[in-house]
Image: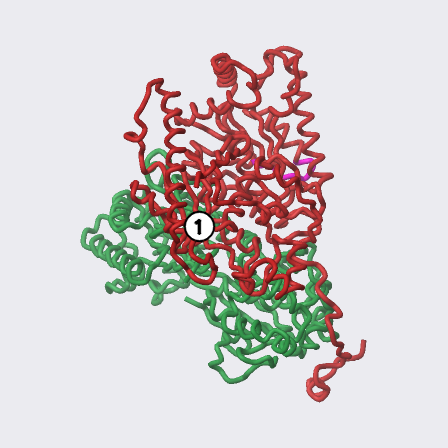
Chain colours: A green, B red
Amino acid sequence: MVFRSVSNEKDLRLCVVMVGLPARGKSFISQKIIRYLSWLSIPSKCFNIGTYRRDLGITEPNFQFFSFTNEENFQLRERAMKLAFDDILKWFNDENGVVAVLDATNSTNERRKWIKKHCEQNNIHPMFLESYCNDNDLISSNVVDIASTSPDYEKVTLEQAKVDFWKRIDEYKEVYRSLSLEMDQDISFVKLINVSDEIIINKIQTYLESRIVFYVMNIRIKPKCIWLSRHGESIYNLEQKIGGDSDLSERGFQYAKKLKGIVKENAGNVELSVWTSTLKRTRQTAQHLPYKKKLQWKALDELDAGVCDGMTYEEIEEIYPDDFKARDDDKYEYRYRGGESYRDVVIRLEPVIMELEGQENVLIITHQAVLRCIYAYFMNVPQEESPWMSIPLHTLIKLEPRAYGTKVTRIKANIPAVSTYKDKGTSHVGERLETGSGAHSLLTGTPEIKK
Amino acid sequence: MSSLLSDEDELFNGFGSETLKTGNHMARRVKRWNEISLQPKNSTDFVARDAIHEANFDDKDYVSPGQLYTTESGRLFHAGKILVALVGLPATSKTLVSVAISRYTKWLGVRTKLFHISEYRKNDTDIPDDYLSAEPQSNEGKIYKNQLVDKVINDMVFFFQETKGQIAIYDSLNIRKDDRRKVQEMFDRWGVTVIFIESILKDIDLINKSIENAIDSSDYKNWDKQEALTNYKKRLALNESLYETMTEAENTSFIKYINFGQQIIVNNNHSGYLINKIVFFLMNLRDKKGRVYLGRCGTSASDKYFDDELLNEEGVRYSRVLTDTVLNRIKNIRKKQFIKVKNENIDIDEEFDPNSLIVWTGPRKRTYDTGLFFLEEGIEVRQRNQLRQLHPGAVGDLSEEEVQKAYPCEYKQSLIDQYHYRFPRAESYHDLAVRMEPLLLELEHMDKDVLIIAHESTLRILYGYLMACTVIDVPKLQFTRNEIVELSFGPFCNTIEKIPLNI
């Protein structure tokens, strides 16, 4: 895989080593980094030490297991660490990995020294990423989240789980040493204090590291919802034309009217920010929404079809047969003449994604290709699949990003609309019902949490 | 509007209740970029001068090389207006940092303007003696300082209000809390986000280098070097006792940039994408220890795009001359530096450290092979994928006449906006620039000399970034096999020199 947006310095192998007490959002940040880098086509993988500990048979430990004075258990946890590290090495060597994230507390100096030494011996650059937090509200909400979702607590009540987890944190506090400019000046590290109140960056050496730190700087850990919708059915949708800047169709306007109620019903009284593209059909779709904050983003404009703007697929196939085929062969990379590719859209979406990470509740009304890219980012959909996903008209999508994945809910407006889905190898527009066509169907698939 | 049709009617009537039209009757009128109406500058002059201080975006159609799209408002990313105010003692490279940030944000298309206070006093003749202190004691000194600051602030306000400006960079001492509060309050009122960047140098080598830069600056034009140094040290001493470093208590957003980015502390920053992007840039900005050399690759038998040929005899000869010329040049510079610092002679061939130079080449065989003689000298030669040349697509290996004949319409189009135009299946210069961004940022932290051997198209992008060229200039830049371009980083602007290759 060639990555065009991020540097591939020779042999660069980076291990992002998480640091921090339990319930500081480490897993959340780890998952986010992986998702972001994958979206940019950088091979990356997360290694969670809890998984390795569970593999060693410690599946439902109580807080005492994490006591640092219990030598036997301590050795077990060290073993889990080594297993994780072996896997990291294997992944770098066998699969040409570029960024590994080691998701563990790594709370002591000794542990970090061990990791640094072994990374360097294996030609891996370690970058430590600490999430330091003393904001009790934030910690409490993380504790609830973990107590209710962690496999460690499958067999106990939420109350019991919470009590135990607080005690587990206390065990770690006994030995935890935070990173500091005075003590750790020789290592590359980033320390996030209360997510982003203060950020300390030490000895960042490569473009790739700076890219990851930049991304992390934009993340807020607070729970939020993101609402997505395509614009209502447009005149060009009816005419089976791509691109353009047409008005909504009659049914499109119906959707715009109905959208207000659907959003209200599902989002309650939350004040949303509404982001649209600069094209008419998205602004018309947003026109009845009662929210004060509405932004038009040029970055959300539909993939530019260049000379094919305003043509039907049949016309494109007839006039530009080579282009038509080339696009089907590699839809992610194909650039319309004078227009854009999916990759180009991903690059220009950077500011939108970063702002989105920093916001709480946003409703985005945009276009098919752009939504595919945004959806792929949140759902970790591979590049080969994302341009073929079906995202139907007149459907509101609710995304709830969580520590281990994003929950999706789809709410249909029950207003009929044409399908604008085009399958591979045909210029015919419309949903194909049989599966296996490569389409990641949002229309017929079941909602899922991607692990 | 007629009432909604049922699904069945819909199916029966084909697509819907509305009359279908043919043709692109509701076309997308707003393109990703404004049409360019900038006029090319005098072609002999653009190669030589760094345009970083030129406000070429006064033109409403301004679009810059790395810009992803243009907007109606002229501002990008819904990031509002931002004032970046430098903070720090003299000799902390504030000017260098301001210029570097501006080079990057301008390249991204953000309308950025530099306000160096030193430029404002440049032409004043009777400057009160105590002005150079952050806190002048005499009446004249106070009045002069206030006048100067007011003038800069007025200009910055004008920049934001009247010229669609998005980032103003205020390069001044700002070491007193009161000065900073004044700036903060002033711009709060204008709805401008203020971010302070405090440059702190603790490393003595970095401080000395910074002093050296300062006495070479316009402040000390026509001064005797020794006198300038004395004066500058006095200025430094004057301010050290007045220095109030930034703390959380000030309740402002600030970035501490310590020892040229070895450490960065970001405080109270909730302002989003664009400021984070500046921090991102600062993570890549280091004290650069070398120069950049740009050279073409040697010739091959047919010089075609589509086959990846080896060098021909002439190409090998070229590589030899290129290697010797670059090495000679670098060794001479080192020698001069050594003599200047140590005041004794040196056998540079003996002392030359091969690790102080690296060669980056494009991924093609003849490009890499052009660097091979450097390998013999123990110098690292690295192929960089980002230096892959502009993909010419359908017009690859066609002469201009042939293109004109085979693609008359495309050819005409390409002349209107050479930078953004893309031939069928090809890349545009813009596409190339976007994929080369990581490399540009890597250049911002080079700690050695770098020779880049690459195709002319990629050299244009590199040069365009380093010399702040417009999208009109970039495709017109010329790199020949008769010379290499040497680029030196300066604190105020970059400079170039052309070194002839005697072939």
Determine the residue located farthest toward the left in the rendered image.
Answer: A72
Q: Picture coordinates of residue B361 (x, y %)?
A: 41, 49
Question: Does residue B186 lie above or below B214 as drawn?
Answer: below
* Residue at position x 29%, y 30% in the image: B351
In the rendered structure, the answer to whether residue A375 lies left or right of residue A115 reads right
The N terminus of chain A, quarter of image: bottom left
User: What is the number of callouts on the image?
Assistant: 1
Residue A215 within the magenta-colored segment of the rendering:
no
Residue type indicated by callout 1: Ile
* Residue at position x 50%, y 38% in the image: B267
The C terminus of chain A, quarter of image: bottom left
Report whether residue A158 is seen: yes
For the magenta stretch, what is the residue range?
B188-195
Q: Picture coordinates of residue B485 (x, y %)?
A: 49, 39
> Can you identify the residue that label 1 sits on?
A212
Question: Does residue B63 lie above or below A390 as drawn?
Answer: above
Q: Picture coordinates of residue B192 (x, y %)?
A: 65, 39
Looking at the image, which is closer to me, B2 or B29? B29
Q: Picture coordinates of residue B369 (x, y %)?
A: 37, 51
Disc 1 crowd, CA 10 A, few/some/many (<14, 14-19, 20+): some
In the rendered structure, the answer to whether residue A373 lies left or right of residue B157 reads left
Q: Chain of mark 1?
A: A
